Image: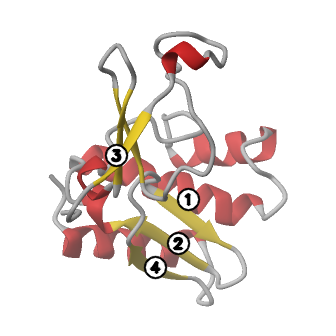
């Protein structure tokens, strides 16, 4: 579990080392993504919910991932330029976060007929079928959604 103030110090140090003074760091309230590089505001942010549950190495990798985006530029995406920069910085992860998400904040909880649980942070606007039960949409695997009375 990373301590948020320590995460802030690491982020500020990485920004000072690799980026110019126009970049800043902030925590955000994301529940499914770990970090974000905002080119318009020139800000790197990290989910406070996920940072609090990641270990130090995981959150350091998130910071390296986002600094690599800032260095590679807005059009680089996760392409070759970004990969080269990320590797040079010491990043060893993949393109996207595949770890834990803050499902306890999901307003909508759904179950398929087989009992698989699904979480959504916004009300589903169309019928959804369980991808764990079948790779293609199948009405037999429709998810039934219920709104939580109070998200955590």
Q: Which residue is mark 1?
A: 66
C-alpha separation, residue under disc 1 versus residue under disc 3: 18 Å
SS for dot 4: strand
SS for dot 3: loop
Q: Are marks 1 and 4 in contact (CB under 8 Å)?
A: no
Residue 149 marker? none
Q: Foreground: 46 or 101?
A: 101
Dot 1 or dot 3, earlier in sequence: 1
Indicate whether 125 appears above or below 127: below
Q: Which residue is mark 3?
A: 101
C-alpha separation, residue under disc 1 versus residue under disc 4: 11 Å
How far across and down, in percent of the image, does residue 8 sit? Answer: 31, 75
Dot 3 alpha-carbon crowd within 10 angstroms: few under 14, some 14 to 19, many 20 or more: some
Dot 3 or dot 2, earlier in sequence: 2
C-alpha separation, residue under disc 3 versus residue under disc 2: 19 Å
Dot 1 or dot 4, earlier in sequence: 4
Q: Which residue is mark 2?
A: 44
Dot 2 alpha-carbon crowd within 10 angstroms: few under 14, some 14 to 19, many 20 or more: many
Residue drawn 64% across and 81% down? 42
How far across and down, in percent of the image, does residue 68 sit? Answer: 62, 56
SS for dot 1: helix
Q: Are marks 2 and 1 in contact (CB under 8 Å)?
A: yes
Placement of the C terminus among the 4 image quadrants: bottom left
Q: Are marks 3 and 2 in contact (CB under 8 Å)?
A: no
Depth check, mark 3 against mark 2: the one in front is 3
Quarter residue 84 falls in: top right
Q: Are marks 3 and 4 in contact (CB under 8 Å)?
A: no
């Amino acid at each position: 579990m990373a301590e948020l103030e320590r995460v802030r110090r690491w982020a500020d140090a990485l920004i000072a080392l690799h980026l110019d003074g126009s970049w800043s760091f902030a925590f955000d309230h994301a529940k499914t993504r770990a970090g974000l590089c905002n080119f318009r505001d020139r800000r790197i942010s990290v989910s406070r919910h996920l940072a609090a549950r990641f270990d130090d190495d995981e959150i350091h990798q998130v910071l390296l991932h986002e600094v690599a985006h800032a260095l590679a530029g807005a059009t680089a995406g996760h392409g070759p330029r970004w990969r080269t920069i990320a590797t040079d910085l010491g990043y060893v992860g993949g393109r996207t976060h595949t770890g834990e998400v803050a499902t306890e904040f999901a307003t909508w909880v759904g179950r398929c007929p087989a009992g698989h649980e699904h979480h959504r942070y916004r009300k589903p606007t169309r019928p959804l079928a369980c991808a764990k039960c079948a790779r293609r949409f199948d009405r037999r695997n429709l998810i039934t959604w219920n709104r939580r009375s109070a998200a955590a």
